[in-house]
Amino acid sequence: MTTCTVDFVIEPFVEGAPGPHVVAGIAAMEERGLDVMMGPFGSTVTGTVETVSDAIKAMVGAAVKDGARRVLVEMVIDET
């Protein structure tokens, strides 16, 4: 299985006080079995390309539904 790492930011974002759009997006990732690592400049998940791709779709949908104005996503495919 091919794995990948995704860095994402759900905006607007205020460190230490994530809004409902951020909480909903992260919950969508976690509901698909991914461990979300939240950092000061964004969040990161790692998993199979298939699982992460499905989770990205769900995350964007949930975040936008709850008020996100921008969702930034960068996926890096593991070549090992």
Image: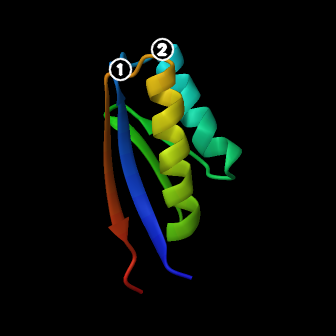
Q: Residue at image x 50%, y 23%?
A: 65
Residue type at mark 2 is: Gly
Q: Where is residue 58 shown, x and y percent of the image? A: 55, 43
Residue type at mark 1 is: Phe
Q: Count residues near mark 2 (Cα–Cα under 10 Å), then give few for <14, some for 14-19, many for 20+.
A: some
Q: Where is residue 29 shown, x and y percent of the image? A: 59, 44
Q: Disc 2 or 1, which lies upstream in sequence?
A: 1
Q: Where is residue 18 shown, x and y percent of the image? A: 47, 17
Q: Count residues near mark 1 (Cα–Cα under 10 Å), then give few for <14, some for 14-19, many for 20+.
A: some
Q: Find residue 77 and report its image quarter.
A: bottom left
Q: Residue at image x 42%, y 87%?
A: 80
The correct choice, above or below, for 22 with respect to 56 in the image is above
Q: Where is residue 4 shown, x and y percent of the image? A: 44, 68
Q: For mark 2, what is the residue?
A: 19
Q: Find residue 43 and report its image quarter.
A: top left
Q: Secondary structure at mark 2?
A: loop
Q: For mark 1, what is the residue?
A: 13
Q: Find residue 15 and report its image quarter.
A: top left
Residue 42 vs residue 61, the one in the foreground: 61
Give the color scheme: rainbow, by chain, secondary structure or one colour.
Answer: rainbow
- On-image quarter of the N terminus: bottom right
- Answer yes or no: do the residues labelled 2 and 1 have beta carbons within 8 Å? yes
Q: Residue at image x 44%, y 48%?
A: 44
Instruction: Name the disc covering residue 61, or none.
Output: none
The correct choice, above or below, for 6 with respect to 10 in the image is below
The correct choice, above or below, for 34 with respect to 64 in the image is below
Please state the total of marks drawn on the protein image: 2
Instruction: Report, in whole angstroms, how far the alpha carbon at label 2 lies from the one at label 1.
Output: 7 Å
